[in-house]
Image (cartoon, helix red, strand yellow):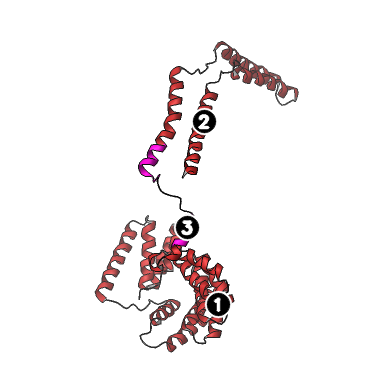
Amino acid sequence: MFLFWVVAGFLAAAAAGLMLLRAAHSAAPASTTDPAQVLYRRQLSEIDDLVDRGLMGEGERKGAHAEAGRRLLAAAETPAETWAEGPRARSLVLLAAAAAPALALGLYLALGAPGMRDQPYAGRLEAWRKSDLNTLTPPEIAAVLRQAVKERPSEAEGYRLLGLAEDASQNPVAALQALRRASELAPERADIWRMLGQAAFTAAGGKMEGEAVMAFTRVLALEPGDPAARFYLAQAKAEAGKTTEALAYMRALLADLPQGSEGREAVQARIASLEGKPAPVTGDPQELAMIKGMVSSLASKLKANPEDPDGWVRLVRAYAVLGDIAQRDAAYASARARYVQTPAVLQQLDAAVRAEPMR
């Protein structure tokens, strides 16, 4: 705490010193040489130089000389104004220099916590380690697990749990790094490879790229027929433009999934999307009718007043959630054409068009 007050006092003194130094520079005696006269004399010499280099004719020199001479005479007849500080100005500067740290101190005493002890990170980390994990936030859990894996660097489970905590902390890059290490320590565990594939898919912005494809391929090698791996690898085919192969993969997966299984509707929706058809929507008919009515109203408003970028983003996302692929693509194309020069809106539209259909 003593160090805090020392540093705070030093900063306050430095701020006051800067104010006084600037005021002293402003109050320094002004130069007796009028800069305007110096400027016009330089113009006269430059005119002669241009004539000597053949860049100005004799007639032009006479006119330019006369104008510069006229301005020089006018400047010589007009005394230069100098600024001089008075007692009042000095008092105001001193008052401001003293008031700034005093005001800062008053605000700190009123709003801050001057009696609070230092909270070094090591002390907080130790308190988190002794606490019930259910009382900690995801970033605090991740901090505890980072320390744990340093102490037990050869245990894959610790890195797997760290990957989960980092993902819950909205830190996909750190989650990916932890799961990579877990897969190195336990290359035979399909659950870790599955998590690594999903983390790579998330880190790539929802795209199936090299590491995600590799991870899910490894899952299938360890657990042939794994539904999640088959779904994501079919998605990779679709993103590569191999729609026919992707549809074949998805249909085979759908045939193997039992009725009522959790992932069956997601597969059906993806098949419909690849076929360019509306996704099958399950849910309360009245709720669905109300949602469709709201979307129709939004579309009508945009037709009457199309200059509403947020409205276009909501409309594209709504059609995507409803699984109406044709309407989604039409609205998306119209909005992109309208806002082709607005990258921020295009980015939101790209995210909206990828919204998952309603289950």
245 or 87, which lies in front? Answer: 87
Res 209 visible: no
Q: Check if residue 106 falls in the magenta segment.
A: yes
Label at residue 215 = 1
211 on left or right of 102: right
Check contact, mark 1 vs mark 2: CB within 8 A.
no
Dot 3: element: helix
For the residue carrying disc 1, how many other residues have a C-alpha within 10 Å: few (<14), some (14-19), or many (20+)? Answer: many
Q: Inspect the image, locate mark 3, and give the three-letter code of the amino acid beneath it.
A: Gly
Badge 2 or badge 3: first in the primary sequence: 2
- Of badges 2 and 3, the one in the foreground is 3
- Of badges 1 and 2, the one in the foreground is 2
Res 277 visible: yes
Dot 1: element: helix
Q: Residue furthest front?
A: 2
Q: Residue furthest left?
A: 286
Q: Position of residue 287 (x, y in %)?
A: 26, 72
Q: Inspect the image, locate mark 2, and give the three-letter code of the amino acid beneath it.
A: Gly
Q: Main secondary structure of the magenta part?
A: helix
Badge 3 or badge 1: first in the primary sequence: 3
Residue denoted by label 3: 123
Label at residue 17 = 2
Q: Inspect the image, locate mark 1, and give the three-letter code of the amino acid beneath it.
A: Ala
Mark pair 3, 1: CA separation = 38 Å
| In the rendered image, the vertical position of residue 86 relative to residue 171, given as above or below | above
Q: Position of residue 288 (x, y in %)?
A: 28, 73
For the residue carrying disc 2, how many other residues have a C-alpha within 10 Å: few (<14), some (14-19), or many (20+)? Answer: few
Mark pair 2, 3: CA separation = 37 Å
Q: Quadrant of residue 272?
A: bottom left
Q: Residue furthest top?
A: 77
The magenta stretch is 104-127
